[in-house]
Each structure stands twice: as structure tokens, then as C-alpha cells.
Image (spheres, rainbow, N blue to C red):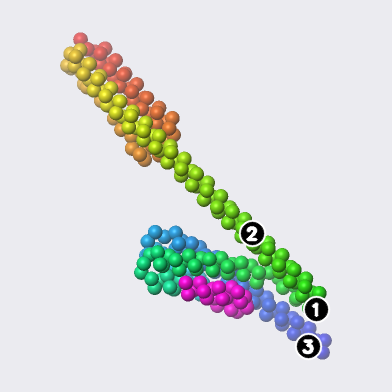
């Protein structure tokens, strides 16, 4: 009788280990599905949105089958919901409607990962006799795990929020910087043009007929402004003014 009991116990360990492996595979596929769903949500046209949605469906179908085998019920139910949302996104022709279903799929996919985290935790009943005290202990441990996962999720959300706020701040500062550079560009190039005209009129008045007119390429593109500092922009136009003055001195030196 003892041998039979031990055999049953060992077989239960093997089955549980295989189920755990299935849940581990499901977690990996769910992560792939999450990545593709996020890319679909970031797409700016319906073709790319549907392309990533199809990839997410392929990964989520594996999650659905594996969670059924490893008996992770919550994850299995959520994976079914995700598949339904993503399939509806493929059926729709309007971008915003299709995107709405992708967004719903993303929420459910995050829920799958949390459920799989719980399902992948080691089962303490393998080496303990289940009684009322053990059930209470397991319930407390499960609650602690859930709280830890929620805390981890909140920390991740806070980190993502901080990153978005930082990026928004960087973008605002870049816009302010570029606006200032545009103002400098307009005023500097306008005055350099006037300076060039004044210099060339002066050369004509001095009757330096054999001399070439002073000419300087001082126009600046927005792409060039974006990759340099405000001080660098000012230094550029300052140098152009110096170059014009140097040309005038050279012309006057040769003027008879």
C-alpha cells in the first residue's frame, strides 16, 4: 500500500512539472504577443496595425493552448478574450475602431502575464500534507504574492509615466530652443543681407571696379539648427559677419 501511495505521489509530481513547463512556455509566448500588440497600437496606419495584430494572434494562440494544458484558468480565459479582440481588429476597416480592439487586447494581455506569474509559482502542496492550517498559510502566501505583483506593476507604470514626462519635457525644451534659433536665423540673415549690400555699395562708391563683389553664403537650414546649440548658431552668424568685414578690408587694400 505504501509503495502504491509513493508511486501516485511521484506521478503527481511529474504531471505538475510538465504543467509548469507549459505555463513557462505560455509566459514567453504571452510576452511576444504583448510586444506585437504594443507595436500594433503604436502603428500610424491600419496596414501596419493589422500586420502586428496577426503576429500577436499567432503568439496568443499558443498561449491559449498551453494555459489549457497547464490549467492556468484565468490566463486561459483572458487569452481567449485577447484572440477575440485581435480578430475583431482585423475585421474592421476604420483605423480608430480597429485600434480600439487592439487597446482592449493589450489590457487583457497584461492580465495574462500577471495570472501566469501566479500559476508559475511553486506549489507548496507537493511536499506538505494539506490540512486546514496549510490552506490558511497558502492563502496568505497567495495574497502576499498578488500584492507583490501589484506593487511591481505599479512601479513599472510609475517608471513608464516618468519616462513619458521626461520625453515630453525634452521635446518642449527642443521646441523652445528651435523657436529661439529661428528668431536668430531670421534677424541675422536679414542683417547680413543688408550688410552685404552696404559693403558692395561702398565698394562701388570707392570705384573699386576690378574687385569682385563681397558675397557670403550665410543661410542656415532647420536641420542644421536642430543639431546645434543656440550659442553655436550665434557663433556661426558672428563668424559670417567677420568674414564679410575681412573681405571688405582685402578689397579696399587693393582698391586704387
Give the percent coordinates (x, y) of residue 143: 71, 67
Q: Is residue 206 above or below residue 107?
A: above
- Label 1 Cα crowd, 10 Å radius (few <14 / some 14-19 / many 20+): few
Residue 32 in view (yes/no)? no
Callout 3: SS: helix
Q: Is residue 30 left or right of residue 171?
A: right
Precedes in sequence: disc 1 or disc 3? 3
Give the percent coordinates (x, y) of residue 200: 22, 20
Most extreme residue toward the bottom, as rendered? 1
Say which quarter of the image contains residue 174: top left
Callout 2: SS: helix
- Quadrant holding the C terminus: top left
Assess whether residue 74 is covered by the magenta stretch: yes
Do the CB atoms of the residues marked 2 and 3 lie less than 8 Å apart? no
> In the image, what residue occupies the spot 31% across and 29% down?
189
Which residue does the numbered mark 2 point to in the structure image?
Answer: 152
> In the image, what residue occupies the spot 58% across and 79% down?
68
Closer mark to the observer between disc 1 and disc 3? 1
Which residue does the numbered mark 3 point to in the structure image?
Answer: 4
Cα distance in 3D space between marks 2 and 1: 31 Å
Q: Is residue 75 left or right of residue 90?
A: right
Say which quarter of the image contains residue 223: top left
Give the percent coordinates (x, y) of residue 175: 42, 41
Q: Is residue 175 above or below residue 215?
A: below
Say which quarter of the image contains residue 177: top left
> In the image, what residue occupies the spot 39% across and 59% down?
44
> In the image, what residue occupies the spot 33% across and 34% down?
220
Precedes in sequence: disc 2 or disc 1? 1
Give the magenta part as a residue range: 64-85
Precedes in sequence: disc 2 or disc 3? 3
Cα distance in 3D space between marks 1 and 3: 22 Å
Q: Is residue 110 above or below residue 233?
A: below
Amino acid at each position: 500500500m505504501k509503495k502504491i501511495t509513493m508511486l501516485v505521489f511521484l506521478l503527481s509530481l511529474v504531471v505538475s512539472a510538465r504543467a509548469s513547463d507549459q505555463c513557462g512556455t505560455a509566459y514567453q509566448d504571452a510576452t511576444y504577443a504583448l510586444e506585437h500588440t504594443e507595436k500594433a497600437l503604436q502603428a500610424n496606419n491600419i496596414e501596419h496595425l493589422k500586420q502586428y495584430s496577426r503576429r500577436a494572434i499567432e503568439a496568443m494562440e499558443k498561449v491559449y493552448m498551453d494555459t489549457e494544458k497547464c490549467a492556468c484558468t484565468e490566463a486561459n480565459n483572458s487569452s481567449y478574450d485577447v484572440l477575440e479582440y485581435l480578430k475583431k481588429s482585423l475585421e474592421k476597416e476604420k483605423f480608430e475602431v480597429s485600434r480600439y480592439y487592439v487597446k482592449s487586447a493589450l489590457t487583457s494581455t497584461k492580465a495574462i502575464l500577471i495570472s501566469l506569474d501566479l500559476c508559475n509559482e511553486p506549489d507548496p502542496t507537493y511536499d506538505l500534507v494539506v490540512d486546514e492550517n496549510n490552506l490558511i498559510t497558502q492563502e496568505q502566501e497567495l495574497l502576499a504574492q498578488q500584492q507583490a505583483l501589484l506593487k511591481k506593476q505599479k512601479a513599472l507604470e510609475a517608471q513608464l509615466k516618468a519616462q513619458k514626462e521626461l520625453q515630453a519635457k525634452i521635446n518642449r525644451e527642443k521646441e523652445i530652443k528651435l523657436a529661439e534659433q529661428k528668431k536668430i536665423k531670421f534677424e541675422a540673415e536679414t542683417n547680413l543681407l543688408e550688410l552685404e549690400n552696404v559693403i558692395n555699395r561702398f565698394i562701388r562708391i570707392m570705384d573699386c571696379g576690378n574687385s569682385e563683389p563681397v558675397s557670403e553664403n550665410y543661410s542656415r537650414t532647420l536641420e542644421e539648427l536642430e543639431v546645434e546649440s543656440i550659442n553655436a548658431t550665434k557663433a556661426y552668424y558672428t563668424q559670417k559677419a567677420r568674414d564679410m568685414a575681412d573681405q571688405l578690408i582685402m578689397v579696399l587694400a587693393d582698391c586704387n
